[in-house]
Amino acid sequence: MNRTIEQEEYDIRDDTFTLDREAVALDRSYELDDDAAVSVSRYEDDEELPVDELELAPVAAELDSPDEVDDDLLDEDESGAEGAGEDDDTGATALERLLQAAQAETPDTTDTLQLFFAEARKYPLLTAEEEIELAKRIERGDLAAKERMINSNLRLVISVARRYQGQGLPLPDLIQEGMLGLIRAVEKFDWRKGFKFSTYGTLWIRQAIGRGLANSSRTVCLPVHIGAQARKIVEAERKLSAQLGRSPRLEEIADEVGLPLEEVEEILRADRTPTSLDQGVGEDGDTSLGELIARDEEGPDEVVASRLSHELLRRKVAELPEAERKVVTLRFGIGRDQPGSIAETGRRLGLSERKVRELERRALQRLADDEALAELRDAA
């Protein structure tokens, strides 16, 4: 099997080639052996790799399920950070050298990626026998073997990270997240199971990148499995749009991803992109978005002001003479659902309509002359 880059077609030293072609070349150079010819792009984050497709009949290969991988990552957030510091002396050496060189020479992101691609090309891919030998040495605590295993699989990190571009993190950050997953995979790889390291490591790299996307690219973080399902739905929507020539219905998307319609709707609601109401709009940005959005409900300040106004008005009405207070209470429906007419008020109080109008006019004049109510009107 050809494990080398076609240097005539892809030469990283030739500045005329674009960064994307270099990445594609690295992706093409990463191939699995014939004894485990499984494309790593076929499986999603929450799918378990089928053992029968690995063509490993002599060994009953059992991969860590994604849930177990995810739990380990979530449970070991703090210990993982400490472990990453320890791995800096071993597995992360290549990445450190790359970043140090990039900082010393140029801060340009493209140059940094080119340096990383060049660093990845320095290490040949491992044969199955070499992987087993290195795994045995790693179990005995051989740091040099651990470093070689990681450096020889840098291309795998690049290959997986490229599939997550355009989802909220730039490629350098995706590669950094994937490196954490690669280091963890090297630490947990069990050569006795009989499968290729690339098959096992891909799960860890995807889990690490998925967690990085969930934690870094959103204001409100989603659980990793929800984020993975949301990405499936988005990808299915794009695929169906290309096939149908129109925007697919939710029912069609649900059938494509194999999820109930209600669950798809719930995931899409959770995957909404939040927008700050304080962000400026217009050319000058002097107006905030929140000022332009119509509201059906009163704001908290308006609710408080309304309650205080009603309480003050009730106190002032209670201070009126008894006859005037009764007329105002019945006429304006204070404490009732509906206001009463002059005739109804007079009938209930045993007064003529003329007397009701006179008492109402006096009461309203008293309220109009009240200083506290006058200040309330001015504030409104």
Image: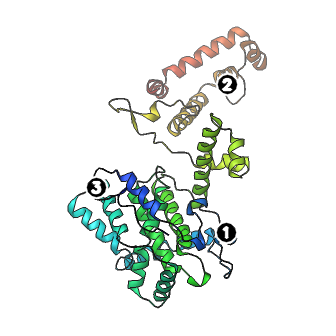
Above or below: residue 212 compared with residue 304 = below
Above or below: residue 275 compared with residue 213 = above
User: Mark 1, residues whose alpha carbon is within 10 Å: few (<14), some, or many (≥20)?
Assistant: few
| Residue at the disc numbered 2 | 329
Label 3 residue SS:
loop
* Residue 315 location (% of width, % of height): 57, 33
Q: CA distance from mark 1 to mark 2?
A: 83 Å
Q: CA distance from mark 3 to mark 2?
A: 90 Å
Of marks 1 and 2, the one in the foreground: 1
The quarter of the displayed image where residue 26 is located: bottom left
| Residue at the disc numbered 3 | 14
- Report the disc number at residue 308: none
Would residue 74 be seen by someone viewing this image from the given angle? no
| Residue at the disc numbered 1 | 53
Residue 121 horizontal side relative to residue 54, left or right: left
Q: CA distance from mark 3 to mark 1?
A: 40 Å
- Tell me, yes or no, whether the two marked residues, 3 and 1, touch with CB atoms within 8 Å: no
Amino acid marked by disc 1: Glu
Amino acid marked by disc 2: Thr
